[in-house]
Structure formats: C-alpha cells, structure tokens
Image: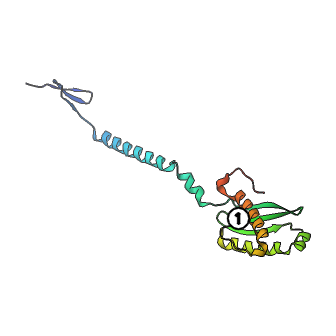
Amino acid sequence: MIYKVWFEEGEYTLSGKTKIVVFRMKELIYTVVFIVLAIVLILLLVFMFRPGRDKDAKETAAYTAGVYTSSIEFQGQTIDVQVVVDEDHINSVSFVNLDESVATMYPLMQSSMDSISQQIYEKQSLDNITYSEENQYTAAMLLNAVSDALDKARTDKGEDEDPD
C-alpha cells in the first residue's frame, strides 16, 4: 500500500489513519518552561498558605507585651496587682497604689509579694511557687491575682482584649 503525504498547516498527514505531527523546538521549550513555572508557583502557594503556618507563629509568643492589673478586694480595701510582660517573659510583679494603712495592718502582704515576685521572675511560671505556712492564705490570694493578670496577657485568649 502506498501512502500519500501532504502538508496541512504544520502537519504531515498520511492518507491512512497515521498522522505525523511536526513540532517546532521553540514551542516545546516555551511549553516546558511554562509548565515548570506553573509547578513552582503552585508549590509556593501551597507552602505560603498552608493551614498550620499561623499557628506556628502564635505559639512563639506567650504573651501580648504590656502592663496588666488584677484587683483584690481585701477587708474593704482594693489592692491592685500589676504584672509587666513582654512577648516571652514576665518582667515584674508588684503592687500598685498599695494604701499605707493596708501595708501597716498587714505587714506580710509586701514581704509575700516580694518573695512570690522573685520566684515568678526566676521561674517565668506560676508553677512550683513556694511560701511559708504562716502566710499561705495571703500568698494564695496574691498568686490568684497574678494568675488573673497573666490570663489577660496570654495571646491564646484572643487579640481583642485590651490591657488594663
């Protein structure tokens, strides 16, 4: 059987069912380059917008930097406990506006706060804080106030809360 070959717009066609297609080398190179670029773009988008990306960034910062306070109602007097934090550390814990009459009537209040503050600063946590039995109730009350202030500073509680 004899095949006739003729040219139709860039194709050589045999008279049977067999077709011979002629590609230009320049078109092949452009096609391969665009396919590689498309794959790279898809991979880049997948890595940029993967679901766990924002979660990793939030885990690095434990607190929202600022000054946070918590109030204690103590024998009709309001005592404010102030906690200063940056993104990763508790910088200080102290009383704010401690009335002299409260400090005079309850002398263990300031010494308990100093001891607790020092331990929190060293451990950067409220875990395993020790205090003496003679001021256990005062220390527990102060630790609760510090815990409340740190809860306000934590980043996982939400970004909408304003520091006091």
Q: Quadrant of residue 83?
A: bottom right
Q: Which residue is at 52% across, 51% downward?
A: 52
> Residue 36's spot in the image, x, y percent?
37, 46
Q: Nearer the viewer, residue 164 or 17?
A: 164
Image label count: 1
User: Secondary structure under badge 1?
Assistant: strand
Q: Quadrant of the C terminus?
A: bottom right
Most distant residue in the left direction: 1
Q: Position of residue 65 (x, y in %)?
A: 70, 61
Q: How is the image coloured?
A: rainbow
37 displayed left or right of 116: left
Residue found farthest to the front: 133
Residue drawn at x 35%, y 42% as measured from the top left: 30
| Residue at which label 1 appears | 85
> Looking at the image, which is closer to me, 104 or 26?
104
What percent of the width, then of the height, locates residue 42?
Answer: 44, 45
Q: Amino acid at mark 1?
A: Val
- Picture layout, residue 39 above or below residue 3: below
* Image point (68%, 52%), residue name: 159
Mark 1, Cα crowd under 10 Å, few <14 / some 14-19 / many 20+, is: many
Q: Which quadrant is home to the N terminus?
A: top left
Residue 138 figure quarter: bottom right
Residue 9, given in percent of the width and then of the height, sits at 27, 27
**Would you identify the image quadrant in which residue 5 lies?**
top left
Side (left or right) of 117 relative to 50 = right
In the shown orientation, is residue 121 left or right of residue 10? right
Query: Is 118 rendered above or below residue 77?
Result: below
Q: Residue furthest right?
A: 101
Q: Residue at x 82, y 61 (%)?
A: 72
